[in-house]
Image (cartoon, coloured by chain):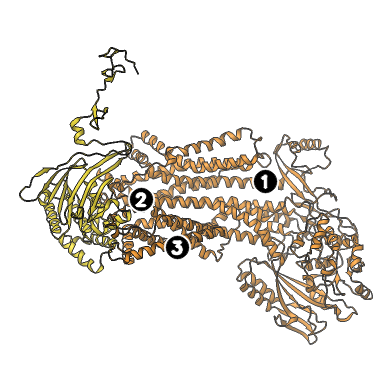
Amino acid sequence: METENFIYVSNVTRYFRDPDTELNVMVLRGIDLKLKRGSFSAIIGPSGAGKTTLLSILGGMIRPSTGQVFVDGIPLHRLSENELNNYRRRYCGFLWQDAEMNLQIGLTVEQNIKHAMNIASYPRELRTARIKELGKKLGMTPRLKHRFDQLSGGEAIRASLAVALANSPELLLLDEPTGELDSETTLEMITYLRKMNEEGTTVIVVTHDTRFERMTDQSFYLLDGSIIKVRKAEGNSQGWKEAVREEYTVINQFGQIQIPLSMRSKFKFNEFLRLVEDDKAERLYLEKVDKDMSICPHCQVETSIHSEFCDSCRGKLVSS
Amino acid sequence: MSIGTERLAKSSILGMWPLMFFIIGLNSLILYLFLQEEIFLYISLATLLLIFQFLKGRVTNLLNRNKRAESISAPISIRDVLGLAKDYYIINKRYIFASAFGILLMSLVVSQSTIVAESYRQYAFDQFILDDDQSTFQFSISSADYGNYSKWQPFLDLRIDSWMNFQGLELGSMRSYGVVTFRIIMGQRFNLDVEERWIDYARVDTRGLTPEYYNLISQLPSFPDDLGYDDVNSLLVLPVDLIRANQEIGTEIYEIEDFITEVNGQHEFNILVDNDIIQGAASLDFSIGFTNITFAIDRVWQLQDRDLGYIRSQNLKIPKHFEQGTLFTKNGLEWDIFNQLQVANALDLNQLPYVWGSTDKTVGFEAIIYTKVPLIKDMELEIYKNLIQRTKLLIDGDLGLFETTLSPHLPQYQITYVVSSSLQTLITTYLEFGDNLERIMFMSAVPLLIISAFLLFFSLSLIEKRKERIMAKMKIRGSSEDQIRLVLIIEMVIQAVFAGIIGFLLSFLTTPILLKSSGIFEFNGPEIPLIIPTDLLWRLPALGFLITLDFNLISFFNISKIKLEESVMANEYGNSFWQKKNLDLIFFLLSGAYWIIVPNINTSDLPAELTFQVGLISIVAFLISFPFVVSRIFIPLIAFIFGAFIRGFDIFSLSAKNIVRYKRLTSLLVVILLTSFMLSFFGLIFSATMFKTMEEQSRYKLGADVYIQGIDINDPEQLAKLDIEGVVAYSEINVFQYRAQAWETPTEDNPNQVPTFHYVGINPFSFSNAAFWNPGYHQESLDNITAQLNEEFSFGLHSLQANGLDLLIGDHLEFRHGFQGLNIISFELSLTFEFFPRLILQTPEVSSNQIVNLDDIYLLMNFESVETIAMETNRATLDVYQTGAYLKLAADADADFIKTELFKRFSSNEEVIVQTFEDNNISFFSTFDAGSDSEGPALTFNPLTEFENKFAVAGLHAILLVSFLITIIATIFYSYVILTIRQNEVGVYRALGMVQRQITLVFVIEIFLIILVSLVFSFAAGLFMAYATILLIAGQNLEAVPPFELTIPVAEFTIIVITAAFVSFLVSYFPIRRAASKQTGSILRAI
C-alpha cells in the first residue's frame, strides 16, 4: 500500500472558510494520487483549481480536512505542528510562486541559502561546497552576494530555487516556477529540474505552462478541486486520459454539501432545490423547483401560487 | 500508523503552559522590583520552580529521544541558532532598532520615575529631619572626670580650628545632608565641703513634662527605683510650679525644699536637692545652684506593668514619652537651662569660658555636636569621629595652659556618640508621611507608565506583523518552534541588556533635567537633589531587563499561531470586540453626561463617598474612552469633511483621504497623541488652578479682612450666618494658641540691666504656609522685618518662621539702620504674639522689675522658662484650641456694615469674637480658658504635608514634561514605521508622476492634520477633565474655600502647542523626505 509509493494521497479534501460569507468552501474534493520515488510530475490546471492547496498539503504547510497523505510512509495528516516542521526540514524543498515569499528580504542570496541550512542544521563541512554547487548549477554564482531587491524576476526565482534545494531535499515542490520567466529561461529551468530529478529528487511542479507536459513523467489536470485528467509518459501513449473517477462530496456536521462546479454548470441549479428521499432505493436526490408552483394542501399536487384555487382539485388555496 | 511519527520529534521544549507560568512569574518579579512587596517575590519563585520542574522532564525526554538512532529530529545546534539569530538581525535590523528604542524609552521612563520618586522621598525626608527641632545624631565630648590631670582644671576653649572641622562636615561626604550645630555645655561643680562625692550629678529633664504627667509619674509605683538618683548627692532641678503643686509627693521621695538663690539679686532659681545636699549647701555660699553632667541623664524610664496599670486606672492615655521607652532625654535640655541662666543675667554665653575659668568651680565641660544626618552609615560615622578627634582643647592645668586633643583612648577626653533615640521616633513619624508620599508618587507615575507601555506595545505590535512574516518564511523551511523561540530569546536578551543598561544610564542624564525643570514648573519649587539609592543600581537594570522580556512575549504567543498560507502576507487588522460593541462610545458618552448632569442637580442626599467614587470612575472612563472614540470616529469624520470641502486642492484632499483610508494605523498614533496631550493639558490646567487656589487660600489666611474666633466651623447654622453681602469667601481655620519664650541679652555696658523689649512677631504657621505657596513672600516679609528693626528692637524667630524666610543655620543677616548683623547659629529663640495672620508690631509692657508681663504676651515653647520669668504671676497657662473663620471682603464692600451685621448675628454667642483688621496695631484679647481641652494644633504648618500637597500638584507637571517627550517620540515612530509599511504607496505616487516635493507634502499634511486635530480635541478633553477633577475634590464645599477658577496658563500653553506642532513637523519631515526620494522600482520590489 502506501509504502510502495513515495507519495500516497487518498481521498483528500480541504475546506477553507470564506471570510465574506463565513461559509466553508471545499477547495479539494477527494484527491487520489500515487507517485513513485524519483518521479517528475506536474499538476496543471486553471486558477482557483486548488493546485497550490494540494501542493501546500504535500509540503506539510496545511493539513487536509479529510483523507490521508503519506510521504515516504509518514502520515502527514496525523502529524503535530512540530512534527510537520521537522518533516518540512527533512524532506521538502518548497518554492512559492511569489519569490518574495521564498527569500528573506534583507539577506543576500548566499545568506538566504545559509539561512535555510542553519534552520536544517545542514552539515557544516558541506555547506560551502553546496552553495558553490547550487550557484554553478543555477547560474547564480555572480549574483550570490546580491540582495532580493537587486535581483531580476528570473534571478529571484532561481535564487528561491537555490534556497529550496539548499538542504538537498528528497521532495521538491514548485508552485508556478516559470510564471515570471521568459521562454528561454523557462526551458533552462525545466532542463535543470529534469537534471535534479535524474539525481533522485522527486519533483512536483504546479503550473499552467503546457511545456511541462512533455517533460514530466506524469501530469495531472486539476479542475475545481479534483483531478480530471491524467497524462502519463509511459510507452507511446503521450496523450491525456480522462481520470477514471466518480464525484464525491462530503457532508459536514451541519449537513452542508458542495456541488462540484462541473455539475453546477451542467445542471444549472436555481436557488431552490427540493430534497427528495427515495426510501426504496435508499438514496437522496435533488429536484429542481419552480418558484411559482407550490404544493396544494388538499391533493398534494403542484399548482400555481397565483391562482386562487388548485388546478387539479379546485380546492381553495390558503394564502400563507 | 506509527512508522513515520516515531522518526519525528513530537513536541517542543518550550510549550505553552510553561510560558504562561513564566509570564506570571516574570510579572510578579517585576512587581516585586517595582513595589518591593515580598509576596510577589514568593509568587515568582513558586512559578519559576514549577517551570523548572516542567522543563526538567521535557529536556530529559528530548535527550532520550535524540539518542535513538532512527530519530531524524534535528537536535538544536547552538551554533546554527546563533547563525539564525544573526540572519534575523540582518533581516530585521531597522525594526529591531525601532523596537529597542521603544524598550529603551520604557526603561528610561521606569527608571526615571523611580529615581524621581526616590529623590523626592529622600528630599522630603531630609526636609522633615531638618525642619524638626531635634537632632538625629549626636556626639558627646565630655570630660566629666578629668581629675587625673588636675583637680580643678578649667576647660578654656575649643580651638577655633575645630569649628572649621565641623563646618567641613557639611561640605564633606554627606553633601548638604546635615546641619552641624555645636553646643558647649558647661558643668558647674559646687564648692562644697562634701569632698569628692560630687562627681556624679543628675537632673531630671522636664521638657514635655506637664504637671499632669508629672503628677502621674511621681505617683507611679516604680518611681523611686528607676529614676536613677540613687546617689545621695544627686541634684534635681525642677520648675517651681511643678514642685509647688506637688509638695507632698516630692517629700515622699526626697526631702525637697525650695532652695532659692538670688542671682545677681534679680532672678530666682529653684534648686531642689536631696536633703543631705541642702544641708551641706546651706552652709555654703555658692552662686549658681545648678549642675549638669551627661552621664546621669541618659537614664531610661522603663515602664513596668504596674505603671501601665496605674496610668490606665487614671483613665489616661499612655504618654508618648512612655511609649518610646524613655522619659528622660537630654536633647537640648542643657541649652534650655543655660537659656534660663542667661535670661536671668547670670551667664553670658559668649563669655562662658572666661567666666567659668575665672572661678575655681568648673568641673568639666560637655560639647554635644548635633548632626542632622538622616541616615548615617558606619563609614561616615568614622569620618565624623576622626574629625572630632582632631578638635583641640585648651586646658588651664597645673602646669599652665596646655593644648590637648580628644582621644578615644584617654577617658578624660572621651568621645562618645549616640544615635539619638528620637531618630527612631522621627523615622517612624516620617514613614507615615512617607507612605503617603510614595502613594502619590506611584499615582503620578502610573499614567506615565501606561503611556510608555502603550507606546511600546504600539511599536512592538507594528513590528509584530513583520516578525510574523519572517517567522513564517523560517517555518516554510522547516524551522521548529524551539529554534524560532531561541532566536527570539537571543533578540530579547540583547535588547533587554541594551535597553536595561542604556535606559538606566540615560535616566542619570535625564532625571536631573526633569528635576530641575519640575522646579521651574513648580512655581518657586525647591530644587530637588538627585539621589540614587544603591539598591536602585541593580533594581533598575533588572526592571528594564524584565520589562523587555515581558513585552516581547507577544511574539512568543504568536509563533504557534502563524499559518503557512498566503493570507499570512495580508496586513489586515480585525475590529476589536469593544469597537464592535461601541463600548468606547458608550463609556465616553456616559462619563461626559455624568459631569454635565451631576453638577446641576442636587446630590446632597447621596452619600459623599459614593458620589466621589462614581465621579472618579467616570473621569478614568473618560480618560480611557475618549482617545479611542476620537481616533475611531472623529478623526476619520473630520478628515472626510476636510477632504470634501477642499476638493480644489488635490494634495490636501489626498492627505485627508489617506487618513480615512489608513484609519487603523492612524488611530494608533492618535490614541497616543491624545492620551499624552490630554494628560499634558489636564496637568497644566489642573496644577495651575490648584496653585492659584492654594495661593489665594494662603493669602486669605494672611490678609483676611475679618477674623472671627470661636465660631464652630462644624455647625452649618453658624456658617450660614457668614453669608453677608460683600463677603466674598471665607476659609475655616483651627486656632491653636502657643506660648513664646522671651529673654533678653544684657548689654556689655550694663550686664545687669534688662533693656526695653521690642518684638516683631509673626505667626509662624500661617507665615510659613504663605511663604510656601507665594513666591517672593518671604523676601517681602524679611524686608518688612528688617525695615522695622532698629537698635531698640529685638528679633525673635521660630524655626518655622526661619524656614519661611528661607534662612538657614550659618546664614548671615544684615539689617538696616546700622543694626549689627548677626550669624544665625540656632533657632532657639522664639517669640510670637496672639495668633494673628498679619505681621504685627508690638511693644509689650515691661514692669518696673524688668519682668515681662505675661498678660501682654503669650509665650511660646518652653513651659518652665515662662514660669521662671514670670513666676510671680503664678498662673497656669494652657493651650487653647478653637475654631474660627477668616472672611475675605469684596473690594467695594461696606466693612462697617459687615462688622455690625456680624456683631449682631453673633451677639447671642458669647464665645464668638469678631475682629477686624483695620490697622496693624490690634489690641490683644485673652480668651484663656483653663477648662478647655487641648486637642492639639489643627492649623499647623507641617512641611511634609504641604510638601505632599505641592508634590501632588507638581507631579502633574512631571507628567506634562514626559508626555510631551512621548509625543515627539510617537511622531517619529509613526513617520518611521508607518512609512516603511506604506512604502508601496510612495512607489505608486512616483509611478503616477508625482515629484518628491508633492509626495512629501502629502505625508506632512497628513501628520500635521492629525496632530492639529489631536491638539484641539485633547485641549477640550484636558479642560473637561480638570473641571471634573476640581468639582470632584471640591465636593460640596465649593464656597467654603476661595472659589476655584479654571486657570489656563496661556504662556505655557502656547509654548506647548507651538513646540508640539513644530517639533512633530520637524521630526516627521526628514523620514518622509527620505522615503519620498526613493525610486519607484526599488520601493515596489523591496516590500
- Within 10 Å of disc 3 (Cα), the crowding (few <14, some 14-19, many 20+) is some
| Chain drawn yellow in the picture | A
Q: CA distance from mark 1 to mark 3?
A: 61 Å
Q: Secondary structure at mark 1?
A: helix
**Measured along the vertical axis of the image, is residue B295 above or below residue A277?**
below
Depth check, front residue: B761 or B1012: B1012
| Chain drawn orange in the picture | B
Where's the C terminus of chain A, which quadrant?
A: top left
Residue B561: mark in rendering: 2
Residue indicated by mark 1:
B697
Of labels 1 and 3, the one closer to you: 3
Q: x, y (%) of residue B188?
A: 83, 75
Depth check, front residue: B881 or B220: B220
Q: Secondary structure at mark 2?
A: loop
Q: x, y (%) of residue A3?
A: 20, 55
**Measured along the vertical axis of the image, is residue B763 above or below residue B217?**
above
| 3 and 2 marks on the same chain | yes
Q: Identify which amino acid the numbered label 2 is placed on.
A: Lys
Residue B52: mark in rendering: 3
- Within 10 Å of disc 1 (Cα), the crowding (few <14, some 14-19, many 20+) is many
Discs 1, 3 touching: Cβ within 8 Å: no
Visible in this render: residue B63? yes
Nearer-N-terminus badge (1/3): 3
Q: Identify which amino acid the numbered label 3 is placed on.
A: Phe
User: In the image, what residue occupies the spot 56% across and 53% down?
Assistant: B442
Q: Quadrant of residue A197?
A: bottom left
Depth check, front residue: B600 or B794: B600
Direction from residue B939 to residue A295 in the image, left or right: left
- Disc 1 sits on a residue from what chain? B
